[in-house]
Image (spheres, grey):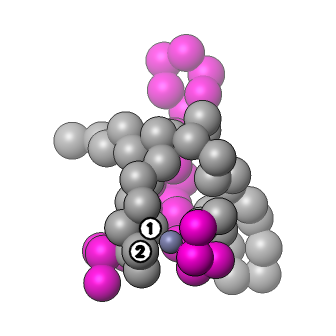
């Protein structure tokens, strides 16, 4: 089951994937998005492209 929301593991703010103000980045730590609310880095992993050609990203970490 693929979640449509990213949830910050620190402050639990929810972001609709791609459109919720959180942007995926690729850094030396790998894929992640930075929570704009609390600044926590949330790790992501790539699931590849869906049938419409969009890259799907899934959170690795469970909320704290
Ligand atoms: Zn947060």
Q: Quadrant of the N terminus?
A: top left
Quick one: SS at disc 1?
loop
Residue 11: mark in rendering: 2
Taking the image as drawn, is residue 48 in sight?
no
Q: CA distance from mark 2 to mark 1?
A: 6 Å
For the residues labelled 2 and 1, say whether their Cβ atoms are less than 8 Å apart. Answer: yes
Q: Position of residue 11 (x, y in %)?
A: 41, 74
Residue furthest out toward the right:
27
Quick one: SS at disc 2?
loop
Residue furthest out toward the front:
37
Q: Position of residue 13 (x, y in %)?
A: 42, 61
Taking the image as drawn, is residue 22 in sight?
yes
Residue 20 location, quadrant: top right
Residue 8: mark in rendering: 1
Ligand 1 closer than 8 Å to the CB at disc 2?
A: yes
Residue at 31%, 44% (x, y): give it. Answer: 3
Residue toward you, 57 or 14: 14
Q: Is residue 62 left or right of residue 22?
A: left
Residue at 60%, 28% (x, y): give it. Answer: 54
Q: Quadrant of the C terminus?
A: bottom left
Q: Is residue 13 left or right of residue 45?
A: left
Ligand 1 closer than 8 Å to the CB at disc 1?
A: yes
Residue 26: mark in rendering: none
Q: Is residue 13 left or right of residue 32?
A: left
- Within the magenta stretch, is there residue 16? no
Residue toward you, 22 or 32: 22
Q: Residues within 10 Å of mark 1 (few under 14, many from 20)?
A: many
Residue range of the region highlighted in magenta in the rendering: 37-64
Residue at 74%, 61% (x, y): give it. Answer: 25
- Within the magenta stretch, is there residue 51? yes
Q: Residues within 10 Å of mark 2 (few under 14, many from 20)?
A: some
């Amino acid at each position: 089951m693929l979640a449509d929301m990213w949830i910050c593991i620190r402050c639990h703010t929810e972001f609709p994937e791609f459109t919720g103000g959180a942007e995926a980045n690729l850094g030396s730590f790998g894929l992640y998005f930075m929570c704009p609310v609390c600044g926590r880095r949330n790790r992501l992993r790539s699931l590849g492209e869906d049938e419409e050609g969009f890259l799907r990203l899934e959170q690795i970490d469970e909320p704290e």
